Protein backbone atom coordinates (compact mmCIF):
# COMPACT_ATOMS: atom_id res chain seq x y z
CA UNK A 1 0.00 0.00 0.00
CA UNK A 2 1.33 3.41 -0.86
CA UNK A 3 1.33 6.38 1.46
CA UNK A 4 -1.51 8.63 0.33
CA UNK A 5 0.39 11.73 1.40
CA UNK A 6 0.81 13.31 4.78
CA UNK A 7 -2.26 15.51 4.39
CA UNK A 8 -3.40 14.30 7.79
CA UNK A 9 -0.01 14.69 9.45
CA UNK A 10 -0.57 17.30 12.07
CA UNK A 11 1.41 20.54 11.72
CA UNK A 12 3.78 20.76 14.70
CA UNK A 13 2.47 24.08 15.92
CA UNK A 14 -0.89 22.36 16.56
CA UNK A 15 0.56 20.07 19.19
CA UNK A 16 3.94 21.40 20.31
CA UNK A 17 4.99 24.83 21.45
CA UNK A 18 7.63 26.35 19.21
CA UNK A 19 10.40 28.84 19.88
CA UNK A 20 10.19 31.67 17.33
CA UNK A 21 8.45 29.33 14.89
CA UNK A 22 10.86 26.44 15.31
CA UNK A 23 10.81 23.26 17.36
CA UNK A 24 13.78 22.89 19.68
CA UNK A 25 14.59 19.39 20.94
CA UNK A 26 17.63 19.07 23.20
CA UNK A 27 19.08 16.73 25.76
CA UNK A 28 21.89 14.31 26.35
CA UNK A 29 23.01 11.71 23.85
CA UNK A 30 22.58 9.17 26.68
CA UNK A 31 21.05 9.35 30.10
CA UNK A 32 23.97 8.46 32.38
CA UNK A 33 22.73 9.10 35.90
CA UNK A 34 19.93 10.78 37.81
CA UNK A 35 22.21 13.70 38.60
CA UNK A 36 23.38 14.21 35.00
CA UNK A 37 19.85 14.05 33.64
CA UNK A 38 18.46 16.43 36.25
CA UNK A 39 21.30 18.95 35.91
CA UNK A 40 21.06 18.95 32.11
CA UNK A 41 17.26 19.10 32.04
CA UNK A 42 17.11 21.95 34.54
CA UNK A 43 19.67 23.89 32.50
CA UNK A 44 17.63 23.31 29.36
CA UNK A 45 14.37 24.25 31.00
CA UNK A 46 15.92 27.52 32.20
CA UNK A 47 16.80 28.47 28.62
CA UNK A 48 13.06 28.82 27.97
CA UNK A 49 13.62 27.64 24.42
CA UNK A 50 13.38 23.85 24.60
CA UNK A 51 10.05 22.03 24.19
CA UNK A 52 11.23 18.42 24.03
CA UNK A 53 13.91 16.73 26.13
CA UNK A 54 15.68 13.94 24.25
CA UNK A 55 16.93 11.13 26.45
CA UNK A 56 18.63 8.02 25.06
CA UNK A 57 18.15 5.10 27.45
CA UNK A 58 19.53 2.28 25.29
CA UNK A 59 22.69 3.00 23.35
CA UNK A 60 23.72 0.44 20.77
CA UNK A 61 27.53 0.58 20.47
CA UNK A 62 29.60 -0.66 17.56
CA UNK A 63 31.50 -2.98 19.89
CA UNK A 64 30.34 -4.61 23.11
CA UNK A 65 31.78 -3.74 26.50
CA UNK A 66 31.22 0.02 26.46
CA UNK A 67 28.50 2.02 28.23
CA UNK A 68 25.22 0.85 26.72
CA UNK A 69 22.77 3.13 28.50
CA UNK A 70 21.00 2.96 31.83
CA UNK A 71 17.91 1.33 30.34
CA UNK A 72 14.46 1.12 31.93
CA UNK A 73 15.59 2.19 35.40
CA UNK A 74 15.57 5.80 34.19
CA UNK A 75 11.80 5.92 33.55
CA UNK A 76 11.05 7.24 37.09
CA UNK A 77 13.72 9.96 36.58
CA UNK A 78 12.05 11.00 33.32
CA UNK A 79 8.69 11.23 35.07
CA UNK A 80 10.17 13.39 37.81
CA UNK A 81 11.83 15.69 35.25
CA UNK A 82 8.63 16.10 33.28
CA UNK A 83 6.85 17.13 36.48
CA UNK A 84 9.63 19.54 37.46
CA UNK A 85 10.25 21.19 34.08
CA UNK A 86 7.13 20.64 31.98
CA UNK A 87 9.25 19.55 29.01
CA UNK A 88 7.95 16.74 26.80
CA UNK A 89 10.07 13.60 26.99
CA UNK A 90 11.38 11.70 23.94
CA UNK A 91 13.19 8.35 24.10
CA UNK A 92 14.81 6.36 21.27
CA UNK A 93 13.06 3.07 20.55
CA UNK A 94 15.43 0.72 18.76
CA UNK A 95 13.35 -2.41 19.31
CA UNK A 96 9.61 -3.12 19.81
CA UNK A 97 10.31 -3.86 23.51
CA UNK A 98 11.66 -0.32 23.94
CA UNK A 99 8.51 1.13 22.36
CA UNK A 100 6.28 -0.98 24.58
CA UNK A 101 8.15 0.17 27.69
CA UNK A 102 7.90 3.81 26.57
CA UNK A 103 4.12 3.45 26.19
CA UNK A 104 3.87 1.75 29.58
CA UNK A 105 5.81 4.54 31.29
CA UNK A 106 3.91 7.39 29.63
CA UNK A 107 6.80 8.78 27.59
CA UNK A 108 5.49 11.59 25.34
CA UNK A 109 7.22 10.58 22.13
CA UNK A 110 9.66 8.10 20.73
CA UNK A 111 12.24 8.44 17.98
CA UNK A 112 13.67 5.92 15.57
CA UNK A 113 17.44 6.14 15.12
CA UNK A 114 19.36 6.03 11.85
CA UNK A 115 20.33 2.38 12.38
CA UNK A 116 16.67 1.48 12.83
CA UNK A 117 15.22 3.38 9.86
CA UNK A 118 17.62 1.49 7.64
CA UNK A 119 15.88 -1.79 8.55
CA UNK A 120 12.24 -2.08 7.38
CA UNK A 121 11.69 -5.29 9.42
CA UNK A 122 12.57 -3.52 12.65
CA UNK A 123 10.58 -0.42 11.73
CA UNK A 124 7.54 -2.63 11.10
CA UNK A 125 7.95 -4.40 14.44
CA UNK A 126 8.13 -1.08 16.26
CA UNK A 127 5.12 0.21 14.27
CA UNK A 128 3.21 -2.92 15.34
CA UNK A 129 4.19 -2.31 18.97
CA UNK A 130 2.75 1.23 18.96
CA UNK A 131 -0.24 0.46 16.72
CA UNK A 132 -3.30 2.46 17.71
CA UNK A 133 -1.55 4.32 20.56
CA UNK A 134 -1.13 7.51 18.52
CA UNK A 135 2.19 8.21 20.25
CA UNK A 136 4.16 10.87 18.33
CA UNK A 137 7.20 9.52 16.51
CA UNK A 138 10.32 11.27 15.24
CA UNK A 139 12.05 9.38 12.46
CA UNK A 140 15.72 9.91 11.67
CA UNK A 141 16.99 9.39 8.15
CA UNK A 142 18.59 6.00 7.47
CA UNK A 143 22.39 5.85 7.71
CA UNK A 144 22.59 5.27 3.97
CA UNK A 145 21.44 8.02 1.60
CA UNK A 146 18.26 6.29 0.44
CA UNK A 147 15.19 8.52 0.62
CA UNK A 148 12.87 5.54 -0.05
CA UNK A 149 13.87 3.89 3.24
CA UNK A 150 13.10 7.15 5.04
CA UNK A 151 9.71 7.55 3.33
CA UNK A 152 9.02 3.84 3.95
CA UNK A 153 9.61 4.17 7.70
CA UNK A 154 7.31 7.22 7.82
CA UNK A 155 4.63 5.27 5.92
CA UNK A 156 4.88 2.29 8.29
CA UNK A 157 4.48 4.50 11.37
CA UNK A 158 1.66 6.43 9.72
CA UNK A 159 -0.16 3.21 8.85
CA UNK A 160 0.13 2.21 12.52
CA UNK A 161 -2.14 5.15 13.31
CA UNK A 162 0.25 7.94 14.24
CA UNK A 163 -0.39 11.33 12.65
CA UNK A 164 2.13 13.18 14.78
CA UNK A 165 5.31 12.44 12.86
CA UNK A 166 8.49 14.50 12.55
CA UNK A 167 11.41 13.58 10.28
CA UNK A 168 14.94 14.24 11.55
CA UNK A 169 17.81 14.89 9.16
CA UNK A 170 21.04 13.68 10.83
CA UNK A 171 23.31 13.23 7.82
CA UNK A 172 24.59 10.08 6.12
CA UNK A 173 27.43 7.67 6.56
CA UNK A 174 30.24 8.46 4.18
CA UNK A 175 33.21 6.19 3.54
CA UNK A 176 35.15 9.11 2.08
CA UNK A 177 37.00 11.54 4.30
CA UNK A 178 34.66 14.39 5.21
CA UNK A 179 34.66 17.60 7.24
CA UNK A 180 31.72 16.30 9.21
CA UNK A 181 31.00 13.03 11.01
CA UNK A 182 28.02 12.43 8.73
CA UNK A 183 27.77 14.06 5.33
CA UNK A 184 24.64 16.28 5.17
CA UNK A 185 23.59 15.73 1.52
CA UNK A 186 20.99 18.48 1.90
CA UNK A 187 19.29 17.46 -1.31
CA UNK A 188 17.91 14.34 0.43
CA UNK A 189 15.85 16.12 3.12
CA UNK A 190 14.78 18.57 0.40
CA UNK A 191 13.58 15.62 -1.68
CA UNK A 192 11.72 14.23 1.36
CA UNK A 193 9.99 17.59 1.78
CA UNK A 194 8.97 17.57 -1.87
CA UNK A 195 7.65 14.00 -1.66
CA UNK A 196 5.77 14.52 1.60
CA UNK A 197 4.75 18.18 1.69
CA UNK A 198 3.48 19.22 5.08
CA UNK A 199 5.67 16.74 6.94
CA UNK A 200 7.71 18.59 9.58
CA UNK A 201 11.45 18.02 9.08
CA UNK A 202 13.96 19.09 11.70
CA UNK A 203 17.76 18.83 11.68
CA UNK A 204 20.14 17.13 14.10
CA UNK A 205 23.31 19.19 13.59
CA UNK A 206 25.08 17.34 16.42
CA UNK A 207 25.27 14.03 14.55
CA UNK A 208 26.03 15.72 11.24
CA UNK A 209 28.87 17.79 12.72
CA UNK A 210 30.30 15.22 15.12
CA UNK A 211 32.12 18.12 16.78
CA UNK A 212 30.64 20.91 18.88
CA UNK A 213 32.66 23.45 16.87
CA UNK A 214 30.52 22.92 13.79
CA UNK A 215 27.08 22.54 15.38
CA UNK A 216 26.10 26.18 14.86
CA UNK A 217 27.11 26.38 11.21
CA UNK A 218 25.17 23.21 10.38
CA UNK A 219 22.14 24.54 12.26
CA UNK A 220 22.44 27.77 10.30
CA UNK A 221 22.37 25.90 7.00
CA UNK A 222 19.33 23.92 8.23
CA UNK A 223 17.51 27.19 8.89
CA UNK A 224 18.42 28.58 5.51
CA UNK A 225 16.97 25.37 4.03
CA UNK A 226 13.79 26.18 5.97
CA UNK A 227 13.79 23.11 8.17
CA UNK A 228 11.30 23.24 11.02
CA UNK A 229 13.56 22.92 14.01
CA UNK A 230 16.60 21.37 15.64
CA UNK A 231 17.55 18.39 17.78
CA UNK A 232 20.78 19.25 19.61
CA UNK A 233 22.72 17.01 21.99
CA UNK A 234 23.25 18.79 25.27
CA UNK A 235 25.00 17.77 28.49
CA UNK A 236 25.69 19.70 31.69
CA UNK A 237 29.37 18.64 31.40
CA UNK A 238 29.91 17.64 27.75
CA UNK A 239 33.57 16.73 28.14
CA UNK A 240 32.60 14.09 30.73
CA UNK A 241 29.85 12.55 28.58
CA UNK A 242 29.97 8.77 28.23
CA UNK A 243 28.82 8.90 24.59
CA UNK A 244 29.34 11.48 21.84
CA UNK A 245 31.40 13.74 24.12
CA UNK A 246 32.90 15.68 21.17
CA UNK A 247 29.61 16.93 19.85
CA UNK A 248 27.58 17.76 22.96
CA UNK A 249 27.19 21.33 24.19
CA UNK A 250 26.07 22.89 27.48
CA UNK A 251 22.61 24.42 27.91
CA UNK A 252 24.30 27.86 28.06
CA UNK A 253 26.03 27.22 24.72
CA UNK A 254 22.70 26.14 23.28
CA UNK A 255 21.16 29.45 24.34
CA UNK A 256 24.02 31.34 22.70
CA UNK A 257 23.73 29.40 19.45
CA UNK A 258 19.97 29.88 19.28
CA UNK A 259 20.29 33.58 20.04
CA UNK A 260 22.85 33.99 17.26
CA UNK A 261 20.72 32.05 14.81
CA UNK A 262 17.53 33.94 15.61
CA UNK A 263 19.26 37.30 15.75
CA UNK A 264 20.30 36.72 12.21
CA UNK A 265 16.92 35.51 11.11
CA UNK A 266 15.25 38.54 12.71
CA UNK A 267 17.07 41.11 10.60
CA UNK A 268 15.11 42.72 7.74
CA UNK A 269 14.20 40.54 4.78
CA UNK A 270 17.16 41.45 2.58
CA UNK A 271 19.68 40.88 5.36
CA UNK A 272 18.08 37.53 6.10
CA UNK A 273 18.30 36.54 2.44
CA UNK A 274 21.92 37.60 2.38
CA UNK A 275 22.67 35.44 5.43
CA UNK A 276 20.87 32.53 3.92
CA UNK A 277 22.75 32.84 0.62
CA UNK A 278 26.05 33.07 2.52
CA UNK A 279 25.21 29.87 4.35
CA UNK A 280 24.59 28.18 1.01
CA UNK A 281 27.95 29.49 -0.22
CA UNK A 282 29.68 28.05 2.88
CA UNK A 283 28.03 24.74 2.14
CA UNK A 284 29.24 24.79 -1.49
CA UNK A 285 32.77 25.72 -0.39
CA UNK A 286 32.88 22.71 1.93
CA UNK A 287 31.87 20.55 -1.01
CA UNK A 288 34.64 22.08 -3.12
CA UNK A 289 37.15 21.25 -0.35
CA UNK A 290 35.94 17.67 -0.16
CA UNK A 291 36.19 17.32 -3.94
CA UNK A 292 39.72 18.77 -3.89
CA UNK A 293 40.74 16.25 -1.23
CA UNK A 294 39.27 13.46 -3.37
CA UNK A 295 41.12 14.74 -6.44
CA UNK A 296 44.44 14.84 -4.61
CA UNK A 297 43.99 11.26 -3.43
CA UNK A 298 43.60 10.24 -7.09
CA UNK A 299 46.70 12.28 -7.94
CA UNK A 300 48.65 10.26 -5.36
CA UNK A 301 47.41 6.99 -6.85
CA UNK A 302 48.51 8.13 -10.32
CA UNK A 303 51.89 9.15 -8.87
CA UNK A 304 52.41 5.69 -7.39
CA UNK A 305 51.52 4.07 -10.70
CA UNK A 306 53.83 6.39 -12.69
CA UNK A 307 56.66 5.46 -10.39
CA UNK A 308 55.97 1.75 -10.82
CA UNK A 309 55.90 2.21 -14.61
CA UNK A 310 59.07 4.31 -14.52
CA UNK A 311 57.26 7.28 -16.04
CA UNK A 312 58.18 10.92 -15.38
CA UNK A 313 55.97 12.98 -13.08
CA UNK A 314 55.54 15.75 -15.66
CA UNK A 315 54.40 14.51 -19.01
CA UNK A 316 54.72 16.86 -21.95
CA UNK A 317 51.45 18.09 -23.36
CA UNK A 318 49.32 16.84 -20.44
CA UNK A 319 49.18 20.20 -18.65
CA UNK A 320 48.29 22.14 -21.80
CA UNK A 321 45.58 19.63 -22.75
CA UNK A 322 44.14 19.67 -19.22
CA UNK A 323 44.06 23.47 -19.00
CA UNK A 324 42.46 23.83 -22.45
CA UNK A 325 39.82 21.24 -21.62
CA UNK A 326 38.91 22.74 -18.23
CA UNK A 327 38.83 26.26 -19.69
CA UNK A 328 36.38 25.11 -22.34
CA UNK A 329 34.20 23.14 -19.89
CA UNK A 330 34.22 26.08 -17.47
CA UNK A 331 33.13 28.53 -20.16
CA UNK A 332 30.20 26.23 -20.96
CA UNK A 333 29.16 26.82 -17.34
CA UNK A 334 29.48 30.59 -17.79
CA UNK A 335 32.73 30.77 -15.85
CA UNK A 336 35.36 33.26 -16.82
CA UNK A 337 38.12 31.57 -18.87
CA UNK A 338 41.21 33.27 -17.32
CA UNK A 339 39.80 32.55 -13.86
CA UNK A 340 39.39 28.85 -14.61
CA UNK A 341 42.86 28.68 -16.19
CA UNK A 342 44.38 30.27 -13.05
CA UNK A 343 42.63 27.89 -10.66
CA UNK A 344 43.41 24.82 -12.71
CA UNK A 345 47.03 25.90 -13.03
CA UNK A 346 47.28 26.03 -9.23
CA UNK A 347 45.58 22.68 -8.87
CA UNK A 348 47.88 21.15 -11.47
CA UNK A 349 51.00 22.62 -9.80
CA UNK A 350 49.94 21.18 -6.45
CA UNK A 351 49.36 17.81 -8.09
CA UNK A 352 52.84 17.85 -9.62
CA UNK A 353 54.30 18.77 -6.21
CA UNK A 354 52.51 15.88 -4.55
CA UNK A 355 53.72 13.42 -7.16
CA UNK A 356 57.30 14.75 -7.10
CA UNK A 357 57.48 14.42 -3.33
CA UNK A 358 56.18 10.88 -3.66
CA UNK A 359 58.66 9.99 -6.39
CA UNK A 360 61.60 11.46 -4.46
CA UNK A 361 60.73 9.88 -1.17
CA UNK A 362 60.47 6.51 -2.87
CA UNK A 363 63.66 6.96 -4.82
CA UNK A 364 65.48 8.02 -1.63
CA UNK A 365 64.30 4.78 -0.07
CA UNK A 366 65.50 2.86 -3.12
CA UNK A 367 68.81 4.70 -3.06
CA UNK A 368 69.34 3.70 0.54
CA UNK A 369 68.42 0.12 -0.30
CA UNK A 370 70.92 0.03 -3.20
CA UNK A 371 73.73 1.53 -1.14
CA UNK A 372 73.30 -0.70 1.84
CA UNK A 373 76.68 -2.20 2.80
CA UNK A 374 76.72 -5.81 1.69
CA UNK A 375 76.56 -8.13 4.61
CA UNK A 376 79.73 -9.95 5.40
CA UNK A 377 79.37 -13.63 5.95
CA UNK A 378 81.21 -14.82 8.93
C1 LIG B 1 21.41 9.58 18.90
O1 LIG B 1 20.48 10.33 18.62
O2 LIG B 1 22.06 9.63 19.95
C2 LIG B 1 21.83 8.61 17.88
C3 LIG B 1 22.37 7.45 18.18
O3 LIG B 1 21.67 9.11 16.68
P1 LIG B 1 21.62 8.42 15.23
O4 LIG B 1 20.53 7.40 15.27
O5 LIG B 1 21.30 9.59 14.38
O6 LIG B 1 22.97 7.84 14.96
MN1 LIG C 1 24.47 10.65 20.10
Image (tube, rainbow, N blue to C red):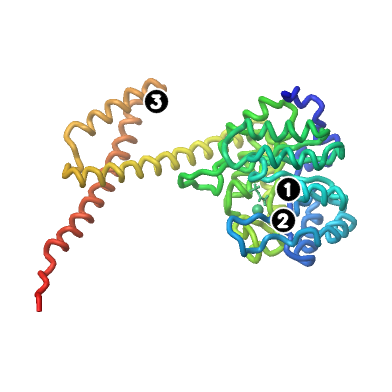
Give yes or no for contact between labels 2 and 1 (Cβ–Cβ under 8 Å).
yes
Q: Quadrant of the N terminus?
A: top right
Q: Determine the residue positioned at 65% across, 66% down.
A: 240
Residue matched to label 2:
58
Indicate which disc, 2 or 1, sits on the residue closer to the N terminus.
Answer: 2
Location of residue 377 with respect to 116 vertically, above or below: below
Q: Is mark 3 within 8 Å of ligand 1?
A: no
- Residue 49 can be seen, yes or no: no
Could you tell me how far apart the alpha carbons at marks 2 and 1 are, in whole angstroms?
Answer: 10 Å
What residue is drawn where x is 20% and y is 53%? Answer: 360
The residue under label 3 is 335
Determine which of the numbered discs, if any, sits on residue 249 in the image. none
**Horizontally, is 222 left or right of 278 in the view?**
right
Helix, strand, or loop for circle 3?
loop
Quarter of the figure that contains the C terminus: bottom left
> Judging from the image, what secondary structure is the residue with disc 1 in?
loop
The picture places residue 249, in percent across and down from the top left corner, at 66, 57
The tag earlier along the polypeptide, 3 or 1, is: 1
Amino acid sequence: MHFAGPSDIMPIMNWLSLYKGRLIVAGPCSVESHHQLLATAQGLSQTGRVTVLRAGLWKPRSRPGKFEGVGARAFPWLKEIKEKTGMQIAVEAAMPEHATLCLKHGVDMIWLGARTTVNPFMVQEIADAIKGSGIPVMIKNPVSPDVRLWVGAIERVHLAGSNKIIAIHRGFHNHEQSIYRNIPLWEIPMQLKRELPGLPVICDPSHIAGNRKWVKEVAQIAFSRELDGLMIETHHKPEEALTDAHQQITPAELTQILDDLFDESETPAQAATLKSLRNRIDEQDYQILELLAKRMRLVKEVGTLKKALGEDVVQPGRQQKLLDDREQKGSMLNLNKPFIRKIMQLVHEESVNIQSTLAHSESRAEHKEQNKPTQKHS
